[in-house]
Image (cartoon, helix red, strand yellow):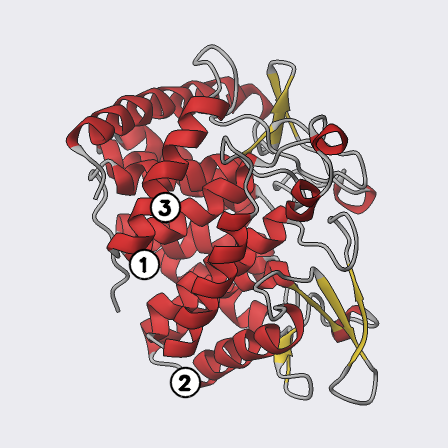
Amino acid sequence: MPTTEHKKEYNKVLDSCIRKIRATAIELQDDFPRFPHSASGGTWSTSGEEEWKKLIDGYWTGGFWVGMLFLAYKLTGEKDFLDWGRKWFAELSPRAKKEGIHDLGFLFFPSAALGAELTDDIELAGTAMEAAAGLFGCYSPFYRCMTIFRREPLDRVIAIDTMMNLPLLWWAAQSTNNQILEKAARNHVDTTIEHLVRSDGSTCHIGDFHIDKREMMKIETWQGRAPDSAWARGQAWAVSGLAYAYFFTGEPNYKQQLDLTLTYFSDHLPDDNIPLWDLDITERAKYEWQKEPRDSSALAIVTHALLMLDEEKYISHADKWLRALIGNCLVPESEPGLIAHVCFHKPAKIDVDCSCVFADFYFLFALALASGRLEFSFHT
């Protein structure tokens, strides 16, 4: 467990983060209903690929902002955070009706499912169930996984990212004892292990199935260095997704795969523990990678999931990595964002060194757990 001194530090940082969330909510009232996405140069902005630029509901990251507001409410009891969370959520909730998009998990697990657990709000739970049904619309019985979209040709594509969309499905399955949803989630994890987790514990980003058989036609990457490398955030999605799978099922093989992917992640961190944007870059000569962007979001994602498991061998990693984030990435209280040095999309040159709301969410969640101020378990 974190030492008393470490918990004091986490509580101090957590208080600072809550003050920043309050300030951000107040500042963004003039821009409502635009959701914060990334911050650099002293201001929040929304950004992303062209198809998303006209959206006001937060790209795939809008649910993380709502989740932060609900977390802040749970930690403080201050009604302002609850009111802000509900106000922003009202703008986000129509997207729960969009069936067949894997990002529904990113949008509605932190906002609706986690929000329902934190606030006991049955309306949030209802929207989370609706979004889970939409996510299930991505399920392919033929490929035995959730594809990233239901439309062609992306209905044959599996992404490592989807491992961290699954918590919405796990939550819905447990909350309603829905064995169909649980079986779909289990099948997806098993298919991901089969096709995207390599024998050394590293992970592929994207797998394209053949149109008429359950075999890989092509392995590629959309955000990593190369198809045969390990994109840092993709590895984090895998580690954390396996942690949630183990958390909800107790399946021994998921724990084994968690340990395998976690070991690869840990073994490929630089001396300060802040990952480079692709883990395999550390295998190259130092002069080649010293100037490469870091991705603190990968460390925050893994850290929160290990703390959620509440097992000593995972907590020792999480304690070290949370301190690394505080020591190397903490954003000054006068600037927007909680942690810096997030690399959102290196190949597309989008926000390669920024703060980003999804990384802030996982950092806040990790702080809340490590400080002892949030004792959390999902209930049915």
Mark 1 belongs to which amino acid?
Ile
Q: In this rendering, which labeled residue sits more in front, label 2 or label 3?
A: 3
Type of amino acid at the residue the image marks with label 2: Gln
Q: How many marks?
A: 3
Residue 296 vs residue 131, the one in the foreground? 296
Location of residue 136 (image quadrant): bottom right
| Marker disc for residue 68 | none
Callout 2 touching callout 3 (CB < 8 Å): no
Gap in Å between the C-alphas at discs 1 and 2? Answer: 22 Å
Q: Residue furthest top?
A: 334
Secondary structure beneath label 3: helix
Q: Residue at x 42, y 43 (%)?
A: 67
Q: Would you place residue 244 above or below residue 211 in this image? A: above
Q: Please name the residue that numbered disc 1 is placed on.
A: 122
Q: Is residue 35 left or right of residue 349?
A: left
- From the image, tell me which residue sits under label 2: 179
What residue is at 50 percent from the left and 17 percent from the top? Answer: 27
Q: Residue 26, percent across and down?
A: 45, 19
Q: Is residue 2 left or right of residue 106?
A: left
Counting residues from the start of the chain, the first of labels 1 and 3 encountered is 1
Numbered mark located on residue 317 in the image: 3
> Residue at position x 41%, y 38% from top?
321
Q: Is residue 117 left or right of residue 68?
A: left
Q: Is residue 342 left or right of residue 66?
A: right
Q: Are marks 1 and 2 in contact (CB under 8 Å)?
A: no
The correct choice, above or below, for 197 with respect to 11 in the image is below
Q: From the image, state whether disc 1 or disc 2 is nearer to you.
A: 2
**Which label sits in the foreground, 1 or 3?**
3
Q: In terms of secondary structure, where does tag 1 sit?
A: helix
**Residue 91 seen in render:** no
Q: State the image quarter where residue 213 is shown.
A: bottom right
Please indicate, yes or no, whether residue 127 appears anywhere in the rendered image.
yes
